[in-house]
Image (spheres, grey):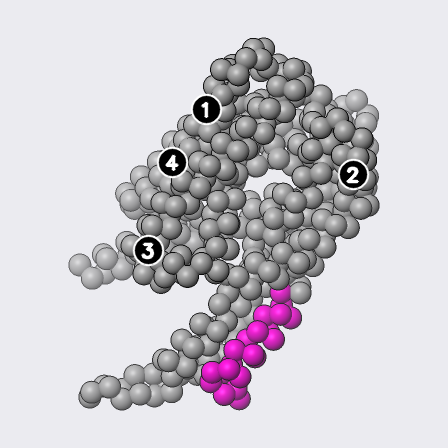
Amino acid sequence: MRSLLAEFMDNTELKNRILFTLMMFFVFRLGVHIPVPGVDTSVLESLFSSGNLFGFLDLFSGGALSKFSIFAMSITPYINSSIIMQLMTAVIPKLEEWRKDGQEGNKKIQKVTRYFTIFLAVVQAFGMTYALRINHALVDNSWLYFFFVILILTAGTCLLMWVGEQITEHGIGNGISLIIFCGIVARFPEAITTVVDYIKVGTISPFQLVLFTIIALGMTIMVIEINEGQRRVSIQYAKRVIGRKMYGGHSTFLPLKVNQAGVIPIIFASSIIMLPVTLAQFVQVGWVQSIGNFFAWGSWPNTICYGVLIFIFTYFYTAITLNIKELADNMKKYGGFIPGIRPGEPTMKYIDKVMSRITLTGALFLAFVAILPNFIGNMTGIQGVYFGGTSILIVVGVALDTMRQAQSLMVTRNYQGFIK
């Protein structure tokens, strides 16, 4: 431990990156507490007290949505834009060509993603501001102020997008993921305070608190195991003679992750399942209200549809992001083969079969962690505190990826010192 701390203190680059990341966190948390002027927060409080729907959305913004700050939309438009661009890359040949161009192609895709983020931010800001306007939450109902609020919310999302990219380039870890990580972790002290107040007033018993703690620890262990779980497919490379040198002849493995899709299927499913419930909050029409009540957050229809959508999207997103045909062709190109399996199409079918089996576990796992909050409140009696496997999945995944990058920076520095 002491040697590890000494290596960290000697690594100037790593320290500077961590300090820069913390500084960007400060900018993010500062913006969360800067409210949009002229908004009646009492209307927002009534909406948030209606259930866990807006609590789920507020979780990813770090409390910015409930305060309706300049970062109320958080980084959600950028996430949606990135996901859509990933899906479009699989169906639009031009985007696929850019992806294969390497760094230059990725810059073009990133540029289009930014512009599409602005478009989605304007659309989302329009919907949020219009909802506030028809609920008389805006002090000034003029159209000039209406578009002024849209401009503030869109500018806040663009600023967060810039902060995330700066963290990725000059900080440590993936900037966009770290912003979500920071927002979730920032809600922990508030959640702990709420639980302590429940204990003081006798709303929950010590046994229920212990049960809640056991569930939290169990979920954390489960998320770590599934998130790090992988099926290692053995690969053998044949010996090749190129010039006077011999290449290949070694064994390795192909790591196939159990949770290849990450948290993306949950975001997909929640966006669809929340649509009728969100419309019912703002549109006072009979049939819309009926659909909204039928799919109310936490109801059995909502829970079942939510789980089924996550299951479907897990397979769909895994198929989009993992190009098995390209993987099998590259193995054949470089003389690699799976022992007992012929190269080419048989290898592709074998990998697809293995991936389908392990994705089943990943899909069931994601569906379970997503619907868990609907049962924790009933089991423990702790209401008003959003807790579930989704937040743990994000926090654990981002923490592990950031630690890996920190370790790689330390290893790189040690190698440079050895060469010198």
Instruction: Between label 3 and label 2, give the one nearer the viewer.
Output: 2
The answer to whether any part of residue 186 appears in the image is no
- Identified at 66% across, 53% down, the residue is 310
Type of the residue with mark 2: Ile
Tell me the number on the disc at residue 151.
Answer: 1
Q: CA distance from mark 4 to mark 2?
A: 39 Å
Type of the residue with mark 3: Gly
Instruction: Between label 4 and label 2, give the one nearer the viewer.
Output: 2
- Identified at 61% across, 52% down, the residue is 265
Name the spot of residue 307 as percent of width and height, x first.
72, 52
Tell me: residue 77, above or below residue 234: above
Range shown magenta: 338-359
The quarter of the picture where residue 294 lies is: top right
Tell me the number on the disc at residue 291.
Answer: 2
Crowd around label 3: few <14 · some 14–19 · many ≥20 (10 Å): some
- Identified at 66% across, 26% down, the residue is 193
Tell me the number on the disc at residue 162.
Answer: 4
Q: CA distance from mark 3 to mark 2?
A: 44 Å
